[in-house]
Amino acid sequence: MSPLLLFSFVIGYFLILLTVAWYTGKNSDNHSFFIGNKNSNWMLVAFGMVGTSLSGVTFVSVPGAVAKDAFAYFQITIGYLFGYLMIAYILLPLYYKLNLTSIYNYLSSRLGLYSYKAGSSFFILSRVLGATARLYLVVNILQEAILNSFHVPFWATTLIILVMILLYTFEGGVKTIVYTDTLQTSCMLLGLVICVFYILNYLHLGFGESLAAMSSKGYSTIFVTDPNSKLFFVKQIIAGAFITVTMTGMDQEMMQKNISVKTLKDSQKNVLTMAIVLMIVILIFLFLGGLLYLYANQLNITATGDKIFPTIALQHMPALVSVIFIIALISALFPSADGAITALTASFCIDILGIQRRTDLNDAQQKKIRKRVHLAFAAIFLLFVMVFKWVNDPSMIGLLLKIAAYTYGPLLGLFTFGILTKRAVKDKLVPFICIISPIICFLLDKYQKLLFGSFELGLELLIINGAITFIGLLLISSKPSTEKHL
């Protein structure tokens, strides 16, 4: 299909987003930018957060990994459900009780200023790395499919997309993103379903027949029962639960949308609804992955991993399906990037700069600072996307989960310590504990064969990281005197 025609659809889609942003961003202020005036519709938030949770990496990497890992990723998804239950009934009541704008304010009130700064800093680090990795994957596909034909360099493509994101998030923030994410999730899921039905029709297979064909190739296995494998189902389910608790429940980007809902009850409905929908959607992505490899085998297509879906959709399917794939892909891209930049802006302004606590700044001055920070994070995103282009990892889903294990572990330890104990920490030492813990985990991962033999460390590294942080906090803590536990 003509790259120019594909590009015209991308521009048309962006203009629709810009229209939504203009309508929702009118008369916005810092409060609406950060938490949507606590007036977001829980059903819109739940549906839109599905798109944010999935991202372009899920759209491309989860189907691509089926040839190697079959449906084993669904084990993690089962764990997600347990994680969302913990978020709904442990973390959300805490956040609503304290009426937080930034969830890391909890660490300030419970553990101290240095703990608060450490927690928000690890969120900023993790979200920058994770969001730019997701952004890189999709930009790279758009570059190869469209922009190379116009001889546009990769850095310029990234810059253009970041400018697009800035244009529709600059004013409205969360208030706008709740609506744009809903639109984008709809487009992404529609693209997913259309691709599934097209391949089923092309291969002349029904649902049951396709599962039988996948089973014969070894694609449809869900549960791995070898305890030494990093894909062992117990490891994966437990890790999935903690990944959700940290990457959603202790993540400002995800929780700022939840706490933008008016009441705790509606926010809990949002989280549990999203959990169920997410499980169904990921199962469909895995099913699509099996279909893609059946399709590739029939047409002798050699692409695998992250490249198989783009290669088939853009080179071996009708023009209409190619357009649908591109729209679905950028619909997966924007929710993960726009929400990240907005959340990073909110966290840096509130947690690091403390603009809401400063009495010397009026609303106009705060807004000016917030816009500058927003632009600065867009520039940081550009830099890190170029770094990922240089690294060029073959499987972004594995890289993202590894990043999460190292950077969210300290957050898991901090929040768990604050919630489960009443002990007071030596606050100034907390950042050192949070830095030492990932270093220990890196060494465990690097030398795991020497230390553990055939036993493989996988996603449970996140739990180990959190446990080391927790133990470190215990070592620098004492019984409280008169401090009330929150």
Image (tube, rainbow, N blue to C red):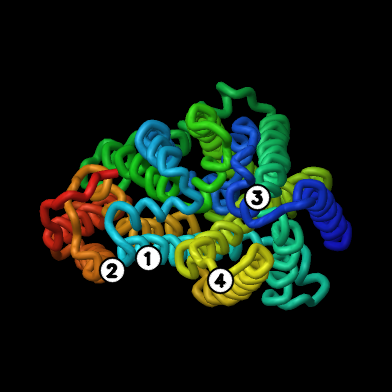
Q: Secondary structure at mark 4?
A: loop
Q: Secondary structure at mark 1?
A: helix
The residue at the point 78 percent across, 64 percent down is 146
Task: Measure the C-alpha gap from mark 3 to mark 4.
Answer: 21 Å
Which of discs 4 and 1 lies nearer the camera? The answer is 4
Which of discs 4 and 2 lies nearer the camera? The answer is 4
* CB-based contact (under 8 Å), mark 2 and mark 1: yes
The residue at the point 47 percent across, 38 percent down is 219
Amino acid carrying label 2: it is: Pro
Residue 372 position by quadrant: bottom right
Task: Measure the C-alpha gap from mark 4 to mark 1.
Answer: 21 Å
- In the image shown, does 313 or 385 lie closer to the viewer? 385
Give the labeled residue for mark 3. Answer: 32
- In the image shown, does 476 or 438 lie closer to the viewer? 476
Give the labeled residue for mark 4. Answer: 360
Lower sequence index among marks 3 and 4: 3
Give the labeled residue for mark 1. Answer: 117
The label shown at residue 431 is 2
Residue 3 position in % (x across, y down): 83, 62
The residue at the point 27 percent across, 65 percent down is 434
Q: Does 274 sit left or right of 227 as displayed?
A: right
Relative to 138, say whether 245 is above or below. above
Task: Measure the C-alpha gap from mark 4 to mark 2.
Answer: 29 Å
Which of discs 2 and 1 lies nearer the camera? The answer is 1
Local crowd size for mark 3, using a 10 Å CA cut-off: few (<14), some (14–19), many (≥20): many
